[in-house]
Amino acid sequence: MGVPELLGGLVVLGVVVLVAKARRSQSVQSRVVLTRFSLTTAPPCVVIQGRTPGVLGWLLTQLKVGSLTTFSVSEREVRLDYKSMNGGTVLLLPGKSVSAVRAQYQSPIWALIFMGAVIGLSSLTLFMMSVSGADVDQALGMICFWNFVVVLLCCLLFIFGKKCVLEVDTDASKGPGLKVGISFSPSVLDGVSINLEQLTTAAELINEKVAQQVSA
């Protein structure tokens, strides 16, 4: 087995590990793809809505038959709705019972690190082959192909693998603490983006409404 074939095998193995890592991280929480992110002063002040991930989930949503998860916060309550063709579930949490608000924004930077490592290893391989007098032209095509595959997959993982979490915790001193929230990722098909500043603003707005309820 030559150097290009060995490099290709290592690249495939690395991509499989990265995809498995991304899928495992998604299975920790119920995750949706963002279709609406609204911050207003009128109730509900925060509305985050998401659909099932994937092209099929987008298509079903366009046909008005897909499942939707909605996390909303008003001056009096925190509400989590799940609706699908099979039915739905609604969870209501009084605003006074909220003790903490958590916002998390995470980008899969490891995908870019892996991409840089593969490109660097490929460049080093070509350099070593040229120094040793090996036929670089024969290996160049295969190495360029695997580099293209890695760059494409890593860029897709970085774009679609971003994870956002917005949740509230209940007061554990009055019983078992409960976490209510939503985990979502930005949507390219729906044209809805999100950044850390927007997520932080949402958390601050929720905290402000909760503080008003507690002091009332």
Image (spheres, rainbow, N blue to C red):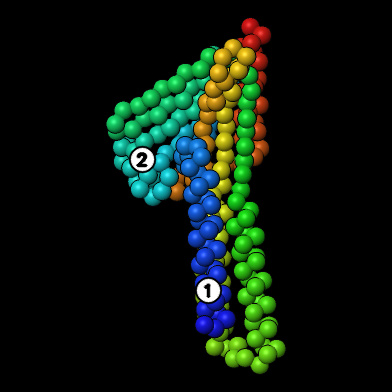
Dot 2 amino acid type: Thr
Residue that lies at the very extreme toward the top in this rendered image: 216
Q: Element type at marker 1?
A: helix
Q: Identify the residue under disc 1.
A: 8
Q: Position of residue 49 (x, y in %)?
A: 47, 33
Q: Identify the residue under disc 2.
A: 61
Residue that lies at the very extreme toward the left in this rendered image: 86
Label 2: few (<14), some or many (≥20) within 10 Å? Answer: some
- Residue visible at 62% across and 37% down in the picture: 104
Label whose residue precedes the other's in the sequence (1 or 2): 1
Dot 1 amino acid type: Gly
Q: Position of residue 23 (x, y in %)?
A: 49, 49
- Residue visible at 52% across and 78% down in the picture: 5
- Residue visible at 53% across and 29% down in the picture: 181
Q: Is residue 163 left or right of residue 117?
A: left
Residue 121's quadrant in the figure?
bottom right
**How far, Cα to Cα, is label 1 from label 2?**
39 Å
Q: Is residue 62 visible?
A: no
Q: Is residue 122 visible?
A: yes
